[in-house]
Amino acid sequence: MRSRHAERLAGPRRICQKREPGLRCDAGCCSIARRATNGRRPGEKLLSTLATTHNGDPEVPVISLENVHKRFGSFVAVERANFEIRRGEFFSMLGPSGCGKTTMLRMIAGFEEVSAGRIRLDGVDVSTVPPYRRNVNTVFQQYALFPHLNVFDNVAFGPRSKGIAEAEVKRRIGEMLEVVRLQDYATRRPDQLSGGQRQRVALARALVNFPSALLLDEPLSALDLKLRQAMQLELKRIQREIGIAFVFVTHDQEEALTMSDRTAVMSEGRVEQVGTPEEIYHSPATVFVAGFIGTANLIPVRVVRSASARAEVELAGGQQAQVPATAGTFSSGDRAVVMVRPERVKLSAQRPENGGRWCTVPVTVTEIIFQGPVLRCLLRDSAGDELTAHIDGAERPPGLAHGAAMWAVWDTAAVRLLPPRAQG
């Protein structure tokens, strides 16, 4: 029973491993490869084969986690993880060091056992299936290229170990090197390549066996800033052309926002929110997500009253404002946190007419920092809470100076009202 169950996980044969030049295969995979050879741009044959390989039910997620727990003794590394990764999407797991994101990736790959719950690949429970029977590949922080082999042979290692005919190996590797734009470097050894080129070799080696998903454990962390930014776009291009799911682990917010279709934000073993970059930036679900993604003003407030989808809150200095709120989340007297992004905060020497649209807080300017097109203004309200405003340098308000008393103003529509972070 175990072996038959594991056989299902290998998926359809991508390229017939028994095929020799001039022979016909009854499985149909070789005819697919032959049909993909005419009238297409370089590298498109490989992309066509990949598309044919991963044409399963689009409604079935390529990866799903169902109430997954992971414990190391009494330490809980991952707690109640429930989310799905769709076919063909770039999905990031983002969080600070020690939050459990790499442990989550290792459980998906099969390198760590699940303490409780289920992990499914292509709809099949693989929680107890060993790594070599799971149709996923992993790119680690250290690329682990064979130093004595050139680029071509590094990428060809997987197909050759599966016994694929050499003619098919050459075709497949040549097309994969075109996808990662290394066709002119096939004879170079790893020590003759730049960091970005070595990273693309590792990608090609992981993709050449046509996995259902590619798992990447902070693969850009060893690169310098400019190369890392260039490789972010390169990774997204490759993922878009190949069309399979990429699962990317990072602690870098910019990487996640730049590349991801969706992101799971993690903290202390828990998945705090799963959403698009726009959702987690503009509509964070928790105080942690609001503070971890970008810069946010997190202002403690008291709920005066709550009705339907709005709540009236009391800000510093006794100012009251009506802000959007999730119905049924808050009651009168509750403590809450108002979240507003610095770019939504304006400064004025005079208090504007409210009319119910504006939140207004009296503040003192404690610092003005020039950052090119933006002035980063540090503020303090009457309760001693610190705020930040990003002001367009070309629209500097009159009276803005160190120590000046001003009004911080923002549209109530820019506010997100959140429960305070749970203690302990």
Image (spheres, rainbow, N blue to C red):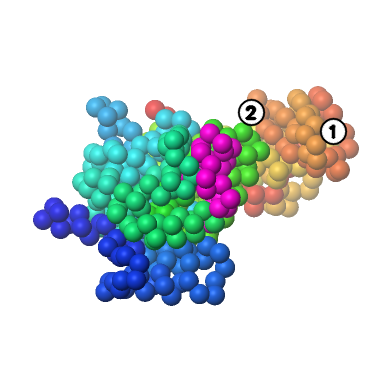
Q: Label 2 is placed on what type of residue?
A: Asp
Kindly give the residue lying farthest to the front in the view shown: 22
Q: Could you tell me which quadrant the C terminus lies in?
A: top left
Residue 223 visible here = yes
Query: Where residue 205 sits: x, y (%)?
Result: 43, 48
Q: Label 1 is placed on what type of residue?
A: Leu
* Mark 2 touches mark 1? (CB < 8 Å): no
Quarter of the image holding residue 148?
top left
Quarter of the image holding residue 52?
bottom left
What residue is pinned by disc 2? Answer: 385
Q: Secondary structure at mark 1?
A: loop
Which is nearer the eye, 333 or 235? Answer: 235
The CA distance from mark 2 to mark 1 is 19 Å
Query: Where residue 278 sits: x, y (%)?
Result: 58, 52
Q: Which residue: 35% across, 53% down? A: 159
Give the crowd class for mark 1: few <14, some 14-19, many >=20 residues within 10 Å.
some
Quarter of the image holding residue 374?
top right
| Above or below, comparing residue 58 to residue 140 in the picture | below
What residue is pinned by disc 1? Answer: 400
Q: Which residues are magenta?
A: 179-203
Residue 289 visible here = no
Secondary structure mostly seen in the magenta stretch: helix
